Amino acid sequence: MSKQQFEIDTRQLERLSSELAAFPKDLRSAMRSSLTTGIRKSLTTIVPKYYAINQSKLTRVFKVIDKRYSGTDDESVSFEVSGRRLTLEHFYYSPQRHKTFRPMIEIIKGHKKKAGDRMGEDGEMKTPFVINAPRQSGGGRIKNVFVPLGRPSQRNPQNEALKSYRTVSVPQMLGHHSVADEIQENLLEVFDETLFKRIERRTGVMQQNISRG
């Protein structure tokens, strides 16, 4: 799991304290919602610039968790981005024809390579291929890159068990230094754009009154 920390410049927020002293809960709520919006928008905007992932699929494979710890300072704000390791269905691979062997895959943009063979449990090298397989949950079928495991399937012992390739998770993508740098910059821009609007909506305090001085 990649751990990447981002820091927010709080000097502007500190200058708001006198104007918003009567609205501490509203201010914290506006801050948290603005940060959540900033994180989600930054991830869905920046990650597809570096990873060959479909933007619509990206929004469904990570969560932004608001971390609140009992007994800690109420002013502290901490978030965690969580997500599972993604299969190749979320990325570019070609060709996508049924039973295509060793397709070319692209996870990081501009870096294409063939899906490699893997050792099966029977000691033999297994060749990956593209097939339409039943979804594990939700019904229907999905086209993905699979590799034989070298043992019988539990569902149908006459067939060989298959496993889909697993790649990186969204949190691991944050370990890419270019992604991390650009997300931090974009996050601050979105945070700044949304914070005052939400403070005004929650408290009725106009932005010009908040910003003066």
Image (tube, rainbow, N blue to C red):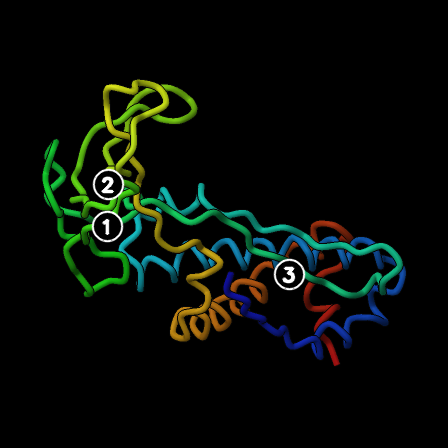
> Which residue is at the front of the view, 106 or 101?
101
* Corner quadrant of residue 205: bottom right
Q: Are discs 2 and 1 less than 8 Å apart at CB?
A: yes
Q: Is residue 5 left or right of residue 167?
A: right
- Badge 2: how crowded within 10 Å, few (<14), some, or many (20+)? many
Which label is found at residue 118? 1
Left of 138 or right of it: where is 156? left
189 vs 153: above or below: below
Mark 1, secondary structure of its residue: strand
**Earlier residue among tags 2 and 1:** 1
Q: Which residue is mark 2?
A: 147
Q: Residue at x 76, y 58 (%)?
A: 28
- Across and down, in percent, residue 177 comes to 41, 75
Indicate which label's residue lies in the foreground, 2 or 1. 1
| Nearer to the camera, 208 or 136 | 136
Number of the front mark, 2 or 3: 2
* Number of residue marks: 3
Residue 185 rendering spot, x and y as whole percentages: 48, 73
Q: Look at 47% across and 55% down and name the residue there.
A: 41
**Tag of residue 160:** none
Tell me the amino acid under the disc marked 3. Answer: Leu
What's the CA distance linking mark 3 and mark 1? Answer: 50 Å
Q: Residue 26: give x, y in percent of width and height.
A: 79, 53
Q: Residue at x 17, y 60 (%)?
A: 112
Tag 2 secondary structure: strand
Q: Position of residue 132 (x, y in %)?
A: 21, 28
In this view, the residue farthest toward the front is 123
Q: CA distance from mark 2 to mark 1?
A: 7 Å
Q: Quadrant of residue 158?
A: top left
